[in-house]
Amino acid sequence: MRSNVHAERHFTQRIGWLRAAVLGANDGIVSTAALVVGVAAAQATRSSILVAGLAGLVAGAMSMAAGEYVSVSSQADTEKADLARERRELAQSPDAELDELRGIYEKRGLDPELARRVAEQLTAHDVLAAHMRDELGITEAQAARPIQAALASAATFSVGAALPLLIAVTAPTRLIIALVSAGSLACLAVLGALAAHAGGAGRWRGALRVTFWSALALALTATVGRLFGTSV
């Protein structure tokens, strides 16, 4: 006899690195492309445009890495503090913690007797893991990983920022604004679709969402560059 295996695909285990990677790549393309377009709109030379774009790449990558590390470290510190508090409570009041776990399962729909048996069995198996998951809502798949988030954000920011820079290097000076804008928006649309697909969402919605806001950022930056460049 052959047993049917019900295979499932879930995406929650990707949340930690996916959020940082998508944010880094998106910000790398948008911020660098906007910087290049803004400087080009101010009638700057190609060398000035490239220097500004390269400086934006380096500064942005370091800023993204530092920001992700600090923010995710704060989340990790909160998780560690909650786990330490839970360990103390389990050591001091095991019966009260067992009742708390039983109450959680009753609220989820189990009858009192079954909720008590489930709480007792999970407590006997791994009491801290049971409370971490069901009381605190902390899971291994979604646990904070500061270094992973920082590296993913910095790396993807650099890759994203390199795209508009590459276009600016190869494009004729008079077409830098048009080609950088078009190329960056195309890359952003693809990135939005891929990110939505990786997260299990609709591709078109992800592509349209990121393209709209990025186009707005490019337009505003080009306007500022043209106005201030002309006045200076």
Image: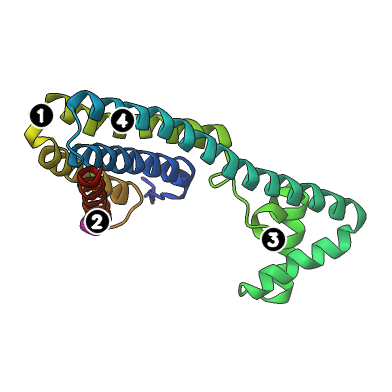
Magenta region: 204-209
Amino acid carrying mark 4 in the image: Ala
Amino acid bearing label 2? Leu
Foreground mark, 4 or 2, reads 4
- How many residues crowd around disc 4 within 10 Å: few (fewer than 14), some, or many (20 or more)? some
Specify the farthest residue to the front: 232
Quadrant location of the C terminus in the rendered image: top left
Name the outermost residue toward the right.
92
Residue at image location 43% in from the left, 46% down from the top = 19
| Residue at which label 2 appears | 216
Secondary structure under tag 2 reads helix
Q: Amino acid at mark 3?
A: Glu
Marks 3 and 2 sit apart, C-alpha to C-alpha, by 43 Å
Residue 171, label in figure: 1
Q: Along the horizontal axis of the image, is 67 left or right of 186? A: right
The answer to whether marks 1 and 4 mark residues whose Cβ atoms lie closer than 8 Å is no
Task: Give left or right: position of 152 versus 117.
Answer: left
Q: Which of these two is toward me, 172 or 148?
A: 172
Mark count:
4
Q: CA distance from mark 1 to mark 2?
A: 22 Å
Residue picked out by circle 4: 52
Tag shown at residue 135? 3
Place of residue 174 in the rendered image (x, y in percent of width and height, measured from the top left): 7, 34
Q: Earlier in the sequence, mark 1 or mark 4?
A: 4
Report the predominant secondary structure element of the magenta stretch. helix
Structural distance between the alpha carbons of marks 3 and 4: 50 Å
Q: Secondary structure at mark 3?
A: loop
- Dots 4, 2 in contact, CB < 8 A: no
Q: Amino acid at mark 1?
A: Ala
Residue 35 visible within the image: yes
